[in-house]
Amino acid sequence: MSTAIEKSAFGKMPDGKPIQLYRLRSDGLEARVITYGGILVSLKVPDRNGNAEDVVLGFETLAEYVEVFNSHANPYFGAIIGRYANRIARGRFKLDGKTYSVPVNNGPNSLHGGPRGFHNVVWQAQEIDGGVELKYLSRDGEEGYPGNLEVSVRYVLENAELRIAYSAGTDQPTVANLTQHSYFNLAGQGCGNILDHELRLAASRFTPVDSTLIPTGELKPVDSTPFDFRNRHRIGERIDSAAEQLRIAGGYDHNWVLNEDPGSLREAAQVFEPHSGRVLTVLTTQPGVQFYSGNFLDGKLKGKQGKIYPHRGGLCLETQHFPDSPNHPQFPSTLLRPGERYQQGTVFRFSTA
Ligand code: GLA
């Protein structure tokens, strides 16, 4: 079935720049994406009885996104993250012998590309078959990163799947790690926490972190730990156990090393919500996935339809390269050189059970 695409206005940035919203509809699903931050502002998905609910956290207005995305409590709801998703230790890395500094905005580290990362810029949009393509030129030196990086992110809604395709090229050696930061609550956004969701992760190892959530460098087997999601587990089952890694992060906020070789799409994760029957399967070309259980949500943010987002009120499955890769030469490389093409894809596939 073909995808219906409609474009409308979604308010103006503080400097007057107009923001557009693209509404994609296909097979009873509906996705809404805006040109600010490439944010997926809503995603309606049917439950086992055919009732569609919005399953991602977010806000109703542009003003709320802009305000919260420029505050210290930024949850990055639904946004495209770059130039480097996740953390870079102390905001420093070396490339071809030169040290680069990027903004320190998360304890001692740099998080999600800095305060003016890709989540906080205006993208150019054009309609494509099945969806929308967003483009952004990140200039040499922007947020400290070298090289002009031209980025394209395509959202396509088809066959009960939201497919996201990332592509980037540079004119100087740089690092690139892009992801999508949607918070899912498959019971419906604002419907309590995600502790009853059941999760499976196709990963036998994860990257343990230090007290500032920077990987120690070890790829640790998940065997006999609360990080073993090779079979489906309720997220709440072990989240508050005494395991040191869980205490450091206040829950799950770690990168899992996906088992099968990166480069082609394979299953990374599956989430099942027992009351609605909704199932989300995540496929990706990336080597890792950050499973974040919404530990920093604290009930202070008021979201869509006046809903309050409680502690662990949404979960993120951020497909990505491992955190702090530029400082871990043994991790899959995030280096991008002129003439090379950064290309990654992630699929959010919906079904019911
Ligand atoms: C990522 C990080 C978390 C947190 C969220 C945003 O998932 O790993 O620690 O910063 O983004 O709140």
Image (cartoon, rainbow, N blue to C red):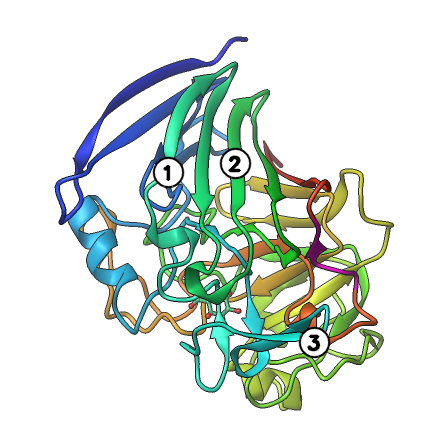
Residue 342 magenta-drawn? no
CA distance for labels 1 and 3: 29 Å
Left or right of residue 344, residue 117 in this image: left
Residue 335 magenta-drawn? yes
Q: Which residue is mark 2?
A: 153
Q: Which residue is mark 3?
A: 327
Residue 348 spot, x, y in % from top left: 59, 38
Depth check: give the residue in front, 199 or 304. Answer: 304
Vertical position of residue 4 compared to residue 21: above or below = above
Give the amino acid at mark 1. Trp
CA distance for labels 3 and 2: 26 Å
Give the amino acid at mark 2. Val
The answer to whether one can see residue 201 in this image is yes
Depth check: give the residue in front, 225 or 328. Answer: 328
Earlier sequence position, callout 1 versus callout 3: 1
- Look at 73% across and 74% down and name the residue there: 207
Left or right of residue 10, residue 210 in this image: right
**Residue placed farthest to the top in the image?**
1
The stretch of residues the image draws in magenta is 332-337
Q: Are marks 1 and 2 in contact (CB under 8 Å)?
A: yes
Residue 323 spot, x, y in % from top left: 64, 69
Secondary structure of residue under mark 1: loop
Give the amino acid at mark 3. Asn
Task: Give the image quarter of residue 158.
Answer: top right
Q: Which residue is mark 1?
A: 123
Task: Give the image quarter of residue 291.
Answer: bottom right
Q: Is mark 1 within 8 Å of ligand 1?
A: no
